[in-house]
């Protein structure tokens, strides 16, 4: 029974990985990049410069908001943080169905409005990670299926690779297949806990969508009503119909906040509800600390008296558990060192998936004398799904710099460039021999990534100079990451070129032997 059971596990591991491997690779690559979502967004919106938070920004923001409109029902101040350099003030005007939002992005030193390019920034990778750009076509459900199959792959992989310690300390470099197999096994051992937690938490986050039957049975609007029932929030502000002038000094409230949150730059944002009403309320949001839950910490105050209001009620245990897994999945709690560790675990997972796809094809090609369409399809999907995705991501960064700033729907055009280049890579993979297609795409990707920091500098020198002067490590670090990534891609190209040269020599020697025999 044991050999048969293990063979079943190997078969399940092999074909479950193959069926969703390319989607899984795309999800893990974009998810791994999402660990540095704010940092990527900083680089993709260089006009923001290096804004820094301080308490003096708050009162100045109130003054600016007071000049906008007397009809505002809510003001919002988003302060720059260590990871996000956006300083934004927003005001909301009541509309027929819902309030209309207006906003200004400001310079934290001059308080002048900054014209910022329209771009999704790093948030594109976060949303693509779980929607696959198929928001209206079941993208979340597809991502959920992929997460479930990944869990199957994790458990069946444990049965497939039983010799954990031996596999972990074994890397054979003499042959390509042995190297790939050993790399796959090592990455599998390293990433078992990571892949399990990421996949399981992904399912738990959207459990009410994936298993909606109970919610639909008990609530009229299904899981949306369920979420309202189990989530807690501050009560809605009721207008007193007594007009007042908005307060102009937030420092008394800020001093009270500092007693509760003593850390530096604790305030992330402030919302002023009904600023022209005597029942106006001010809500202060805290910058995320080392907490697993993604529940935001808030303090609420009466705007006129400055008295602290009752806190939000504690959520139910089930909701707390979901929020903890949400926090674990997105890792907003992580310190820089831990975030880098999670990033490298994500990279290791991507290597695990990519090597598994290549191993599947290579093993089957070695056993057959004549290829069929299935082999061709897998071979070309490997090229487009792995190398093509990397080039598509690179093109997304180029689109951010090359597309004119004032063009309409600019953010959508950046995404379109990503998708079009990915499609071109798929078509190109069918037009060239497999090894040459691999090498060509990796060469273009490597050169593009390596040249991008130079192109960025030539477009506007002040961006890099400003980052160096203000020690903006997010901007500087992203440029360094581009250079390192480009170097890795060029190294892979060099390796592929060497394999191609060996294959040519082998074919040439075989032909010479045939001619000699004749």
Image: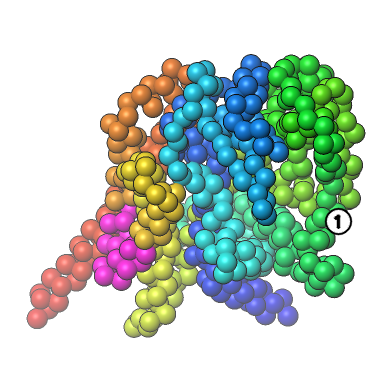
Assess disc 1: are there few (<14), some (14-19) or many (≥20) residues with their C-alpha within 10 Å of its C-alpha.
few
Q: Is residue 426 magenta?
A: yes
x then y, percent, for residue 440: 27, 57
Q: In the rendered image of this protein, does residue 319 appear above or below residue 420?
A: above
Q: Is residue 119 magenta?
A: no
x then y, percent, for residue 272: 73, 32
Q: Is residue 341 visible?
A: no
Q: Looking at the picture, tell me which residue is in the foreground, 311 or 489.
A: 311
Q: Looking at the picture, tell me which residue is in the foreground, 2 or 379.
A: 379
- The residue range painted magenta reads 423-443
Which image quadrant: the C terminus? bottom left
Q: Is residue 20 visible?
A: yes
Which image quadrant: the N terminus? bottom right
Q: Give the side of residue 434 with respect to residue 411, left or right.
A: left
Q: Looking at the picture, tell me which residue is in the foreground, 326 or 81.
A: 81
Examine the image and state in which quarter residue 280 appears: top right
The residue depicted at 66 percent of the width and 19 percent of the height is: 59
Q: In the rendered image of this protein, does residue 503 appear above or below residue 28?
A: below
- Most common secondary structure along the magenta stretch: helix
- The residue pinned by badge 1 equals 229
Q: Give the side of residue 214 with respect to residue 38, left or right.
A: right
Examine the image and state in which quarter residue 421 appears: bottom left
x then y, percent, for residue 486: 36, 43
x then y, percent, for residue 338: 64, 36
The residue depicted at 45 percent of the width and 36 percent of the height is: 116
For numbered disc 1, what is the local secondary structure? helix
The residue depicted at 78 percent of the width and 35 percent of the height is: 297
Q: Looking at the picture, tell me which residue is in the foreground, 200 or 54.
A: 54
């Amino acid at each position: 029974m044991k050999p048969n059971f293990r063979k079943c596990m190997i078969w399940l591991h092999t074909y479950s990985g193959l069926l969703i491997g390319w989607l899984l690779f795309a999800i893990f690559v974009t998810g791994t990049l999402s660990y540095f979502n704010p940092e990527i967004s900083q680089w993709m919106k260089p006009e923001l410069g290096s804004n820094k938070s301080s308490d003096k920004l708050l009162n100045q923001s109130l003054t600016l908001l007071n000049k906008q409109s007397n009809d505002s029902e809510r003001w919002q101040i988003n302060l720059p943080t260590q990871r996000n350099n956006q300083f934004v003030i927003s005001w909301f005007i009541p509309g027929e169905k819902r309030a209309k939002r207006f906003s200004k992005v400001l310079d934290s030193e001059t308080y002048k409005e900054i014209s910022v390019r329209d771009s999704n920034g790093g948030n594109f990778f976060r949303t693509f990670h779980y929607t696959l750009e198929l928001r209206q076509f079941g993208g979340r459900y597809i991502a959920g299926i992929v997460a479930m199959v990944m869990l199957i792959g994790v458990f069946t992989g444990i049965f497939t690779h039983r010799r954990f310690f031996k596999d972990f300390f074994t890397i054979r470099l003499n042959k390509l297949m042995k190297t790939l197999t050993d790399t796959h096994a090592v990455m599998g051992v390293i990433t078992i806990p990571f892949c399990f937690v990421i996949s399981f938490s992904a399912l738990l986050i959207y459990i009410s969508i994936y298993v909606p039957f109970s919610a639909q049975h008990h609530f009229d609007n299904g899981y949306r009503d369920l979420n309202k029932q189990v989530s807690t929030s501050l009560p809605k502000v009721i207008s007193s119909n007594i007009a007042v002038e908005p307060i102009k000094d937030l420092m008394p409230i800020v001093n009270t906040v500092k007693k509760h949150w003593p850390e530096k730059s604790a305030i992330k944002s402030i919302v002023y509800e009904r600023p022209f009403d005597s029942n106006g309320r001010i809500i202060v949001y805290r910058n995320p600390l080392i907490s697993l839950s993604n529940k935001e910490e808030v303090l609420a105050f009466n705007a006129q008296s400055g008295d602290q209001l009752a806190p939000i009620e504690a959520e139910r245990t089930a909701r707390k558990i979901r929020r903890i897994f949400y926090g674990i999945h997105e890792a907003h709690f992580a310190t820089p060192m831990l975030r880098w560790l999670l990033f490298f675990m994500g990279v290791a997972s991507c290597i695990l998936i990519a090597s598994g796809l290549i191993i599947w094809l290579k093993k089957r090609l070695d056993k057959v004398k004549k290829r069929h369409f299935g082999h061709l399809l897998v071979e070309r999907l490997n090229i487009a799904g792995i190398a093509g995705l990397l080039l598509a991501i690179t093109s997304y960064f180029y689109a951010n710099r090359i597309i004119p700033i004032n063009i309409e729907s600019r953010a959508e055009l950046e995404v379109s460039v990503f998708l079009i280049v990915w499609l071109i890579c798929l078509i190109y993979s069918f037009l060239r021999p497999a090894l040459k297609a691999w090498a060509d795409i990796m060469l273009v990707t490597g050169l593009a990534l390596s040249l991008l920091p130079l192109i960025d500098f030539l477009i506007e020198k002040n961006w890099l100079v400003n980052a160096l002067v203000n020690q903006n490590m997010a901007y500087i670090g992203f440029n360094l990451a581009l250079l390192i990534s480009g170097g890795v891609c060029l190294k892979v190209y060099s390796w592929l070129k060497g394999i191609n040269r060996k294959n040519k020599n082998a074919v040439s020697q075989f032909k010479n032997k045939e001619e000699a025999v004749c």
